[in-house]
Image (tube, helix red, strand yellow):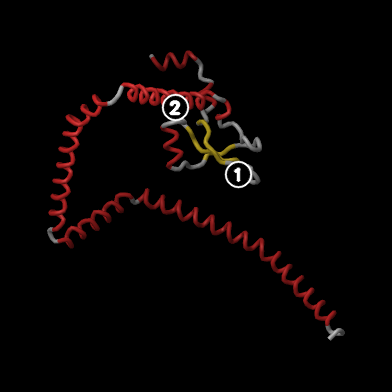
Amino acid sequence: MGFYAPAATRELTVLQALIDKRRVAVLPLTLTFDSIGAGLCCRRGGKLKKLFAENRLEFIAVVAALAGIILISLRGRAEILLKQGYYLLVNGLIVLNHALRTDLPRYIQALPLSIVIGWLLVLLAVSFAIYRVRYRFTVSERWQASECPRCGGGLQRTRRNSIDRFLSHTLLPSARRYRCENADCRWSGLRRKRHHPDQLQLPLREVTNFRR
């Protein structure tokens, strides 16, 4: 047993080395397949959006046909459900109108003056904070889409999500999402919309003539 132990150890070492070499050889292929899969997912999403944009009327017709089939399958029960929903909506509006006309004035009259002043102060403070955020985003050079704040590389505009659009309409006017062009950095964030150089260097005379 002592004579065969070094040989077995040597064989295990050789096998481990072969396994490590195979792992090293397979790793780039795995990364390549992962990148190809991500690219295919992005391409599929783009193709679906393009297909929907080109055949929008056909999709609407299909949805209308499905809605017609559902109404036919209900056999008159859809009309009853629609009437019940209509009556519920009308009753809700009547109750809301009564509450706004009678209950709300009574509640406001019963409020102490200190609570009213407190709410006014809170509203003024929130409005001022929103105004300052919008002003600093519009004026500050830090939010300008000139270079990457992490590595100093160039920026490329990308698609915005729903949260970005909400912020661009509320706190960050004309905000756009940019991504760093450097493959090692890949920073992404919101920055102020980049204007064309020709628009910024337009002479004053041309502007006045255009207004006239």
Badge 2 local density, few (<14 within 10 Å), some, or many (20+)? Answer: some
Q: Are marks 1 and 2 in contact (CB under 8 Å)?
A: no
| 55 to 109, vertically: above or below | below
Q: Which residue is drawn at 57% across and 26% down?
A: 141
Q: In which quarter of the image is residue 156?
A: top right
Q: How many marks?
A: 2
Q: Name the residue under label 1.
A: 186
Q: Nearer the viewer, mark 1 or mark 2?
A: 2
Which of the image's four quarters has the N terminus?
bottom right
| 200 to 162, vertically: above or below | above
| 96 to 87, vertically: above or below | above
Q: Which mark is residue 72?
A: none
Q: Residue at x 16, y 51 (%)?
A: 82
Q: Mark 2 points at which residue?
A: 130
| 92 to 106, vertically: above or below | below
Residue 191 coordinates in the image, percent (x, y): 53, 33
